[in-house]
Image (tube, rainbow, N blue to C red):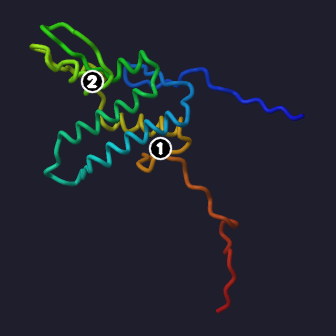
Amino acid sequence: MATKKFALNTTPHVAEVGAHTLLFQPEALGDEFLESYSRLQGTYKGLNLDLTNPALDLGQVRDATVALRQFLASLMLPESAEEFARWDVVVGGKTASSHGDPAEAREAADGRKGARVVDRGLRLPDRVLIELMEWVVELYGGQRPPTSSSGSATASPRPGSPGRGTSRSKA
């Protein structure tokens, strides 16, 4: 009888971003990762962003950034997720509640006199958010997304011996 042992990652993945350390789940279940990534892609498709359009709706860009932050936070350990993506309901200068989803925060603020929603999560440049997304997709999805940066692996060599033709043709 053959025995095969499988190792599970138990140490969180660490992303150091400036002075901040973000901890990501050691393992992400495939269906949870895929569901979260699918939600992100659905949001992007639904927004139908055209970054070359000079009349670009900045509200749509903000929605895309929020969706990306929520995707990344869904793969973080709770304390990092709270630092990274947090929207507070503030009433009278005091935090009444905190939420990982701005829609939930707006819902909690509705009907409360003087309540407003404040984004208190970690704000990062878009390029860093994109790099984080590429990194987690590689970690949990096993491949880089189609928007990968110059950090991609080099292409595999072509078949055949270098410097020698692989076909013979007669002229």
Q: State the SS at label 1.
A: loop
From this view, report whether residue 146 is shown above or below residue 36: below
Residue 121: image quadrant is top left
What amino acid is at disc 2?
Glu
Mark 2 lies on residue: 104
From this view, report whether residue 104 is shown above or below residue 144: above
What amino acid is at disc 1?
Gly
Q: 158 left or right of 108?
A: right
Q: Earlier in the sequence, mark 2 or mark 1?
A: 2
Q: 149 left or right of 69?
A: right
Mark 1 lies on residue: 151
In percent of the image, x 52 and y 39: which residue is there?
A: 138
Which residue extends farthest right?
1
Q: State the SS at label 2.
A: helix
Residue 134: image quadrant is top left
In percent of the image, x 52 and y 25: which residue is there?
A: 13
Q: Position of residue 151 (x, y in %)?
A: 47, 44
Tell how many labels. 2
Give the CA distance from mark 2 to mark 1: 36 Å
